[in-house]
Each structure stands twice: as C-alpha cells, then as structure tokens.
Image (tube, rainbow, N blue to C red):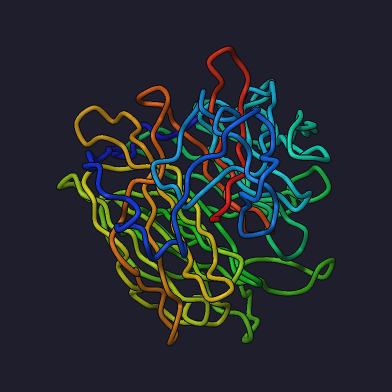
Amino acid sequence: MRWDGWIHHGRTNLAAAALCAATAALAAGCGDDTDGSAGASSGGDVGADGVGCMDARSHDALFSFVDPAWCAVAVHETDEDVGFASVTWGRHGGPMFVRSGADGAAEIVRLTPPDGASGALTAARAEVDAGAPADAFLGGQAVDLPFFDWTAISWTSAFPDTRGELLLIEGGAVAQRYEVNGFFAATAVEGRLLHTGLSPLGDPAAGSSGLYAAESCGAAGQDARLVPEGDAGCAEPAAVAAWGDSSGPVVADRRGNVFAVLSSADGSQQARGFAAGAIARGAGPTEGDVLFTLPGGGMSLAALAPEQGAPGVVVFQPTDPETYEALAPVAVAFRDDGGRAQADGSPAPLLELATAGTSLSLVADEANRLWIGGPRPGGGFLFAVVVRR
C-alpha cells in the first residue's frame, strides 16, 4: 500500500533552453552521446570517474540526455515490481525499496548490482511484521540509517487522520517504534534522522508542514533510541524548519548536506538546502537556503555532492500542477561554501523522457553517481548509472 493520496502532488512545465550555456555550472564542458554498439564506448569518451560512457541506445527506451555534460556508465535491470516506491541507497551497496507484503507485512527489497557495466540486479527480500492497522497505508520508502544498523519504514492512517508510526527495523524485526503525524520521507546523516511530515517523532498531533530531526541516543545494544529519556546529551525531536502546506522528498548527499522540497496550497513548491554543518547532529533550527521555487509538486529527488572543484547537483523530477503527470527531471548546481548550501544557477532540463509521464526513481550511490530508474516498455525495471563527463 501507499499513502500519497493526502499529499498535493503537481508538476511544472519547463521550456527547453540552450543547455550547454544554461548548465555550464554543472560540468566543465559539453559533448555528444557515444556512437556504435549499445555497450561501453571503445573510444576516449569517459565519465568523470574514468569509466567509459555507454552508447545512448542502452537507455533510450527510458530517457535521453538533454544536457550533453552527462553520460551513462552502466545499465542494470531487474524484474522486481518496483512500482511507485521511493528508491533509496542501501548499506548493502545497491538500491532498495519497500512494498506491501502478505497479511499486512512490509517487504523490504534490496537490489545488488552485478560485476561489470551491465547485467541483472540480484534481489534479496525480507518481510517485517509492521503491526500497522488494517486500514493504514505503508510509507513508500525504506531508509538504512548510518547508525545502530537500523532500517526505517513508516505507516500512516488515511486522510484526514494522518497519525502513524516510524518503525526502526533491526535483525528482521521492529526494534523501536515512535508515534508521528504525517511522516512522509526520510534521510539521515551521522547520528541524526531527518524527515518531512507534520510533527516531530513522539508527537501524534498534526502541526506544521516542515523538516524535522531526531538524534541518536544511547549506544548500539545499549538502549539505542531516538528520544533522550532524560539523557542531557541528546536533544528532543524537533522542527528544523517549517514551510509549505504539504510534505515532499528529502535527501542527503555524501558530504552531509540535506535537501528537501515541500509544496504549498497555492500550487508552488520550494526546495531548500541545508549545509552539513547547519544540519548535523546537535545543530539547532535553521531556515536553510532556497534552491528553487517551481509550480506543481514532485516525488523523486537526488543530490550529488561537490567534488574535485565541481559544484554539487540536485536532480528533481517535478509533476504537472494540473494533471499531476511526471515531467522530465531538472538539475540545479549548488555550492556548500561558507556553511551554506546555495544554488549556483537556475534549474535546467537534464533528461527527455522516452514516454511522456514516466515516473523515474532518482538516487545517488556511495560513489557520488546518479542512478536513474524506470519501467522498461517490455516489462521489468531499468537502472542507468550516470555521471558528469
């Protein structure tokens, strides 16, 4: 089950532009897709990590690059039913997602990449008794936390009663559960869980739409938890910043910068960036920096950290404000200098969808590469691993 019915989703129409100029901040130069076979290029066309770019035909059933500063370096497939789940990057070294299992259980699916630039992902499935009410909706996301070996999932009641729980899974069972209202999406930095929703952990009452934080308390195997329970060295779960009227996606890059997109009732959505130092464990409330404001809504969000002098990149797939249909993803560069995560330019088109309205999964891996996933026309699910040239 999914619970996105109470959230306003939308999308935006973005005009095409001269991309090499509009996205100059994203990469040092522009080039063309490789020609020849659908495998890796045999010429000198390589990504930033030195791996050969694949021919565009390896992924053109799903998308093509509008911005020539990017290329695919690997393509993998799976026959798993990913559906509309929000894919995250797991500690096993591959994509992961959660879906409804039998008798109300939650099934966490982990996909492990093969050796080489192409091939099938290996799936491992684990069912968890979530203990959710029969009329509740399973959250669309499973998130491996970088502490206590926990995996976070959630459920919420049907609108207008948006009370629910965050569940922390360890060893295949629920280790901790916390009441929360409108829990929507989560990410984590060392020692801190961050989520979008309507309340902090432990509070079942609906409050303001915003970004919330809860800190790791105790130690692994020694009363590990996300609330202080009298521990003066651990802060109470609280709001980081409140904006918008409904929840949206949140992600962290590998340097600990955090990005969230929340929608407003007027049909707009605003993305904010929170620099690592301002969002780390122990940090107080902060408004963050506005990266962009667009019409509509959207679900899929990923962030690549700045590296080797190049800016970071936030990639987002918006949805149309009238039809709620998925649009082509856009990218915006950012800098995390001076304790702030600020946009370095405006959002520009990154991809063209092969089939209009295709919802994509966007997730960054530990190597700072972007994975773009979506349904294959003939069935199954395709992931393209892409980098800046």
Left or right: residue 96 compared with residue 266: right
Q: Please state the horizontal and vertical placement of residue 66, each as a whole percent of the image.
A: 39, 41
Count of residue discs: 0
Q: Please state the horizontal and vertical placement of residue 244, each as a whole percent of the image.
A: 26, 56
Residue 287 in which image quadrant: bottom left
Left or right: residue 378 compared with residue 90: left
Q: Nearer the viewer, residue 335 or 253?
A: 335
Q: Nearer the viewer, residue 205 or 51?
A: 51
Residue for point 47% across, 70% down? 311
Which residue of the protein is positioned furthest toward the top in this rendering? Answer: 378
Q: Is residue 376 visible?
A: yes
Q: Is residue 139 visible?
A: no
Q: Please state the horizontal and vertical placement of residue 165, each as a whole percent of the image.
A: 55, 47
Residue 56 in which image quadrant: top right
Against 223, is 271 above or below? above
Q: Please state the horizontal and vertical placement of residue 231, each as a whole percent of the image.
A: 65, 82
Which residue of the protein is positioned furthest toward the front in this rendering? Answer: 43
Residue 41 in which image quadrant: top right
Against 136, is 115 above or below? below
Residue for point 63% across, 52% down? 46
Residue for point 41% across, 53% down? 197
Q: Nearer the viewer, residue 83 or 157?
A: 83
Residue for point 76% across, 63% down? 148
Left or right: residue 177 compared with residue 247: right
Image quarter where the C terminus lies is: bottom right
